Image: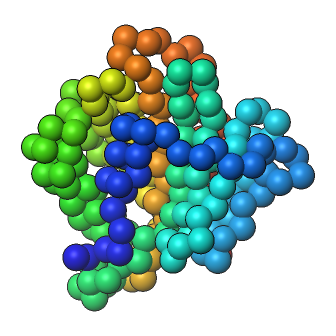
Amino acid sequence: MSYRKSMILLLMVALLGCSTLGKKVTSENNEVRMPHYIFWIPPNAGWYVRTEDDPFETTIVSMDLGIALAQMKFLTQTILDERLRMMTAKEVADDYREKEKIMMIEQGVKKGLYELPRGPTMSEEILGGRTFYIMYYQASSTNNFQDAWLYLLFPKESHNDWFIVAHYSLTAPHGLFIANNRKPDFLATLQSLDTR
């Protein structure tokens, strides 16, 4: 395997079941500092945060919207393949997103866990003067529907040993319109995201 961990497991947790929300985010605890990254969450907006004691530096920021769930997830991804470490950030991002797409189809769609009615589609976006490599998709399970965006941020333009994976999802029962989409909060958090 080229990378240490896949986002597919995080997708399946958000789409098929819930997780513990964590601590409520206030102006006193809205800064998240991990060994390889730092960011700020909009305070007093209804978000909850928890960090995992794992080698991926996982942070999960969640908001319960009643019968829907908005989630931001952040983790570091180690590049294990020496050949990929020599490539540009875009080349590694393309490789990672393609592997994620294949894994979503093999481990989710073909096994009947969910469908992908739209996407995955790839793009790039400049936020805070940095390039993020994006993958957007919609996923649908028996009970829930999910809009999701995967953002990749690299410390350097090439020769990286690791990068940051940021994932935003809005999960709700089928047919439910969510007027309170919290993606602007995710984008504000990405603006503050920095590598260390």
Q: In the image shown, does 116 or 64 lie closer to the viewer? A: 64
Give left or right: position of 48 versus 119: right
Q: Is residue 142 visible?
A: yes
Question: What count of labels does the image hold?
Answer: 0
**Residue plotted at (36% across, 26% down):** 144
Among the 4 quarters of the image, the one containing residue 46: top right
Up the image or down, 69 lies above or below 191; here it is above
Depth order, front residue of 38/61: 61
Residue at point 70% right, 43% down? 48
Residue 45 position within the rendered picture, expressed as x and y whole percent measured from the top left: 76, 33
Q: Quadrant of the N terminus?
A: bottom left
Q: Position of residue 146 (x, y in %)?
A: 38, 30
Q: Quadrant of residue 179?
A: top right
> What is the residue that sits farthest to the bottom in this orientation?
82
Q: Quadrant of the C terminus?
A: bottom right
Q: Is residue 41 visible?
A: no
- The colouring scheme, among rainbow, by chain, secondary structure or one colour, is rainbow
Q: Residue furthest right?
A: 28
Residue 33 position, x and y percent, is 72, 67
Q: Where is residue 2, by image quadrant? A: bottom left
Q: Position of residue 67 (x, y in %)?
A: 53, 21
Q: Residue at x 28, y 30 (%)?
A: 141
Image height check: is 45 above or below 133? above
Q: Residue sitting at 35 percent across and 45 percent down?
A: 12
In this view, the residue in front, 130 or 22, is: 22
Report whether 51 appears left or right of 81: right
